[in-house]
Structure formats: structure tokens, C-alpha cells
Image (cartoon, rainbow, N blue to C red):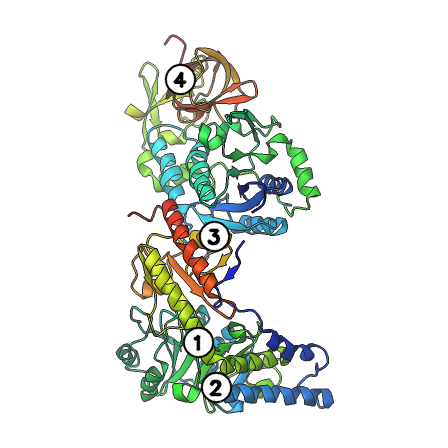
Amino acid sequence: MTSIYLDHSATTPLDPRVLDAMLPYFSDNFGNTLAVHRWGREAERDLEVARESVARLLNCAPHEVIFTSGGTESDNLALRGPAQAARVEGRPITIITTPVEHEAVTATARQLRDTLGAALRIVPVDRFGRVEPDALRVALHNLPRDGVAIVSLIHTNNEVGTFNPIADLAAIAREHGALVHTDAVQAGGLVALDVQALDVDMLSLSAHKFYGPKGAGVLFLRAGTPFLSSQTGAKHEDHRRAGTHNLPGIIGTARALELARDELADNTARLSALRDRLIEGVLARVPDAALSGHPTERLAGHASFVFRGVESNTLLMHLDQHGIAASSGSACKVGNPQPSPILEALGYGPEWTRGGLRLTLGHSTTEAQIDTVLDILPQAVERVRALSPLYSV
Amino acid sequence: MGSKPRVVVAMSGGVDSSVAAALLVQQGYDVIGMMLRLWAEDCSDESGAAVANRCCTPAQMADAQRIANRLGIPFYVIDTQDVFRRTVVQFFIDRYAAGDTPNPCLECNRHIRFEWLLNHALALGAEYLATGHYARVRRDADGTAHLLRGLDPAKDQSYVLSVLMQDKLRRALFPIGEYEKARVRALAADLGLPVARKRDSQDLCFLADGDYRRFLAQHAPHAVRPGPILTRDGRELGQHTGLPNYTIGQRKGLGIAAPEPYYVLATDPARNALVVGTREELGCSTLIANRANWIAGAPPAGPFRAEVKIRYRAPAAPAWVTPEDNDRFSVTFDEPLRDITPGQGAVIYLGDECLGGGIIAQSGYTGL
């Protein structure tokens, strides 16, 4: 049977070169970075080399790099750190976000509303999933005096692949004195991320999205940003994130980011061409189908579709039985799929919002695989529609 | 592709369907596990964690997933909530509103398992749909399928499969029908299946609490209207609280002050009346069933001798069966039965073989 992995936005395999870089840190170089002896010194030295490397790639100071357990933790810290600092000072908190964020942001924002009394403001998005500058201006109106406002905007939408114009939006947020966080988990390693050009205060990355290890991530935190640690303990990460360093994960994160940067241009060109071949083929061969997200302002390896009258779970099952790994924003393993909130936010009607499909390409993807998918997918959609009470011609 | 055909097995997380799946894997089939997510009251929680259908709770799904993982087969949960509500649940409400006592399991096998799920299985390239029912299929050389009782008489479930037409039964596999329940449990232990909990499937799985009277009052108040309690000769003895609240043969709870006990004999939906009578009036020896399904495709020449079950748990009673046409048959029992109930299935057996059945439309005395 065929075996075609097109779910690279969910996770990627570890690059063997990254594994090689990590391996010594499981055994020989096992020291605790806080220890005073040679083992500790060597661990701390290598930790800081990794930090400098990540800082160079993000164009920030090493001190502004916090190593975390992944994208979800980075997003949590980005909202909790400034919100808790504001709370200690008794300043009102406003969190401004969009309906198309990852749950790591939305669930955290809701909890901060419930626990710290943060005010939530949701900025609508256009039909591609982008925040319009004027909509953000409206959301920034009448912020409380002496308050702290945190604007959290997804850099690259995980479900539909669209880029937000982060630099433009950050400039607007700054005019209103707000802090800016961007969740760049989907973009990491696939897009050049320069935090000075983006002009953000915080940025989240997750290593396993770019052929690094799971359980490792980065939060860029601009110097001077008010921040209280969420996980308290010893002085790791300059009191901003306690816990013994996951040195294999940190080394792997840095190595994976370096490799991604070295190969960025080639990778982007190759994946964009394959993606466009896939998009054109699907739209030509599947009736009642549309590309979701922006046609050009989108991630290189990211193709996402909506199919009218299709139930995504059934489609994913059929693709799985053909050896094709794909995903959907409304996917659900317990048979209770709900319409995709992101597709709803993009303005799709009820005939479409259960029928999202995301195919995300990566290192292993070949032209032959794309052509196989273009053979199988139209039949699979047809079969699923034949079973569906949702679809009528 | 393997040499043996592909089979989709309906899994519930319980012992029976788990052993069915394991036997199919042992027999070398290309097995895919599926579970149906059925509609339940108040099942609107987005995490799926709220009130669940009692046939597919989150714990049962997790059990089924674990067993599928253990067996090394793919497992999928199919969202069946909408079609289940539109067919089985709506039918349940409509038949109660019409004065019947429906059996939703029959409708579920007819419309959900052996139509909706079978279609999903066929679309995935499966040749068979397997379930954990205690029943057997015997196949003639020409492919004709016969439905037989399960080997374990105490567990036989052929009654609820009597609605299967020939083209469905040909696609059906019942791997545990060849075993006794005790042997199935032993097989589960031998196979190391993690099915500690003992659960039989639930009759009215979509009710949050199993109380259909409360369900009807809440979801279909039009089906539960008070009306008169009448004798056969039209004497009014009191008021009933709604026909669905009574079962045929019931004695207690009628609220009639009388020297001798009264029993529910029948319902009269046209007058929304509950018909009661004395013990001597109880019992019917004939019934007429419609929506007949003859598994062979057509009824035998009649009248013929057979045994007929009027409920899932009723013993098969000797009778004469007379097919009226392809859709309708009448039954005359050798001895009167106390509780022939319109809406339940009348299922016909010749020895071990289930010939099919129909839905009871009315009952009566011979010659009436």
C-alpha cells in the first residue's frame, strides 16, 4: 500500500542530523546547567551556544530567547507573563486576539479572563483569515488608562496556511501602546522570522514543526517586556521559566532551526511548486471544491481545501485506508465532529464548514506522491459524498 | 492487499464485539474496526464529554480503541448522530404517538447498522460487515444466506436481525454466533483482550436515564395525552395519563376502584383510549403483522407450522403462520398469549432458522 505523509503541519520527523547533534546530550554530556562542576559548566556552555544560535536566527539578543517545552507553553507564557505582571501592579489587562488562533492562545486568554479578570477583545478576520488593519484599530480603541494590552495574532494560520501581515499590525498595536505576541509555530523553519522586522515583543516557536524534537520550543521575549514566570522554582532562564534544562531538546531545537535556515530558499521553492501542482490538480478534478486561505500569501507546503457536503472525518478515514495522512480542522476521533470554527470565521456556510481538508507537504514529499493523491482524492471525495446526507448535486 | 477479504467490524468496546474482531483477525481477514456515534439526549457538549448515548460512551470508545490497537487494526468512530435521530429516534416517537410500543433495535439494525454502516463499509472496499451478535449465517452453494439462531439459546439475538433482507445478510458475519457466552468470555481472556467490564447493549440507548416515559413527556408531549379508560363494551372506568405509560397485560397502577382486578388489554389510538378487562379477557391467540421481511426474499407457501416470538425476550410459541402477501402475514398461536403488543416484532422460526418477521399491527381472538 502507498504511504504518503501529508500532515507536516501536525508534526515532522526528526532530521537525522538533528538527532546526531542531540545524542551526546542524553549520555555523555548529561550535566545540569546550574551545577558548579565541569559537567555543569559544559552543559551551560552548550546551552548558551544554542541560545546564541537561535538568537542570531531570530535577530535578537541571546537573553531574549527562552527555551520552553514547545509551542503551547510558549503561547501560554506570552499571555500569562505580561498579564500576571500587570496583575501584581494592579493594572487592568486587555487581551486582543482573533477567532482563528490556536487553542493554546484562545484557551489561555479565556482562562486569564476568568482568573485575572482580563478583558477579551476579538478582532474579526477577512475571508482568507487575515486581520485587517482597520479592524485592529477598532479593537484598540478606548483601552483602559494605565492598563496593559496584549495583542496576540497568529503569524501563519494552522488550518488554512494564510500569513498575517504581522509587521503592519504590530506597528498599529504599538501606536496604542500594546504589547504584541505572534504565534509563529506553523511558520517556524519555513519562513524567515526576524523579530526586529516583525517588530513584535513575543514570538512562539515549536521545534517539532521543523524537523526538531517534540517537547522543545522557544519564546522570544523582548528585553524590558513586563513578565512574571508561570512555572516557578530555581533561576533557570533568568527566573522566567524554572526547571532543569532539557538540553537534548534545546540542542536539537537550535540545530533544526539552523538547518531550516540554511535550506530555506531551496525548500520554499520546491514545496511551493509541489503545493501549487496539488492545488491546481484538486481544484480541476474535484467538483464543489475551493481553496481555503489565501492563494499566494500562504505557507509554502500548505494546501487546504473545503469540499461542499463532505464530512471531513469520513474523508480522512478513506485517505488513511489509502495510506495518505491528512488532517482537518474539524477532525474528531470520537465521532462528534463540529463545524470548523476557523472556516466559520472565514465566512463559509454550514454546507462547507465540516468539509475542510489540510494537506501539508514536507521534506519527504515527492511529485509522484502528489500525483498519487490527485488520483485518489477525487474518488475518495465522491465516495464520501455518496454516503453523506449533506451533499446534493 | 491480503488474500482474505476486507471486513468492517462494528465495535462497542464490550466483550462480544471485541472477541468478534479478534476472531476475524485470527481468521486472516483484513479487518477495520468501526464504532457508531449515535444520538443521545443533551449530547451537545463540544468535547463530547457530556451525556452520551449509552451504547457509545467516551469510556466505551476508549475501550474499543484500546482493543483495536491491541489487535493492530485501524479503528474509526463514525458520526451517526443525525441519521440516527432522524430514523430511529423519530420513529420511536412517531410510533408511540400512534399508540404502538415500538422496538427501536429493529429499526437500528434495519437503517443504521445494515444500511448506514454497511454502506460505509462497502465504500471502504469491505466485502462484509461483522457484528458481535449471537446469531449464525449459513450460506448455500449459490450464495443464498440463511439466518440461524445463535448457538447459545440464552443469548440468541436473531430476533433483532430478522429485519435483514437477503442482500444485507449475504454481507453479514457474526463470528461469535458459533459460541456460547461462557466460551466467548474465555476467548476474551485467552486473547488477552482488556475487556474487564461486562456490558450488554442497551435497549433504549439514546435515553439519558433509560426512562422512556420521561423522554416522551419531554420530547414528544403530543404522544402522551390523557384519555379515557374503557372496557371492551365501552364503559368508562377512569382516566389514563397517556397511552405510552401502559403496557399490555399490566395490572398495577391503573387507578381503577373495582372488586376484581383489571388488566390492560389493548390501546385504541383512534379514541386515545386504554382498553381494560378482567383476567378472563386477557390473552390473544392471533396477530397480524405488516412490514414483513422474508429473509429468503419471499414467504413460504402458507399456512405453515412455525414458532413465533412476539418480543425479544419472549419464548418462541408454536403457531400457524399465513402469509397474506409479501408485506403482511397473520399468526394463530396454539395457546393464547397475554401480551401481544402492536409495534413489537413478530419473528418466525422453523427450528433453528429465522425465516424473517414483521411488525405487529393488531392482535385478536381466533374467529373475532
Q: Are marks 2 and 1 in contact (CB under 8 Å)?
A: no
Q: Label 1: few (<14), some or many (≥20) within 10 Å?
A: some
Name the disc covering residue B365, or none. none
In three-dimensional space, the C-alpha distance between marks 4 and 1, rounded to whole angstroms, equals: 71 Å
Q: Is residue A199 visible?
A: no
Residue that badge 1 annotates? A268
Provide the residue designation for mark 3.
Answer: A317
For the residues beneath circles 3 and 2, the answer to whether they share a chain is: yes
Instruction: Give the amino acid at mark 2.
Output: Leu
Amino acid type at image mark 4:
Phe
- Which residue position holds label 4? B329
| Picture coordinates of residue A274, whole percent (x, y) | 42, 68
Ranked by sequence position, the earlier of labels 1 and 3 is 1
Q: Amino acid at mark 3?
A: Met
- From this viewpoint, is residue A298 visible? yes
- The Cα atoms of the two marked residues, 4 and 2, are separated by 80 Å
Identify the residue at image location x=65%, y=42%. Answer: B26
Mark on residue A58? 2
Answer few, some or many: residues within 10 Å of disc 4's Cα (few below 14, many 20 plus, some between 14 and 19): many
Q: Could you tell me which chain the residue with mark 2 belongs to?
A: A
**Are callouts 4 and 2 both on one chain?**
no
For marks 1 and 3, give the CA distance: 30 Å
The reply to the same-chain question for discs 4 and 3 is no
In percent of width and height, residue B284 lies at 43, 15
Count neighbours of disc 3 (C-alpha within 10 A) and say few if under 14, some if 14 to 19, many if 20 or more.
many
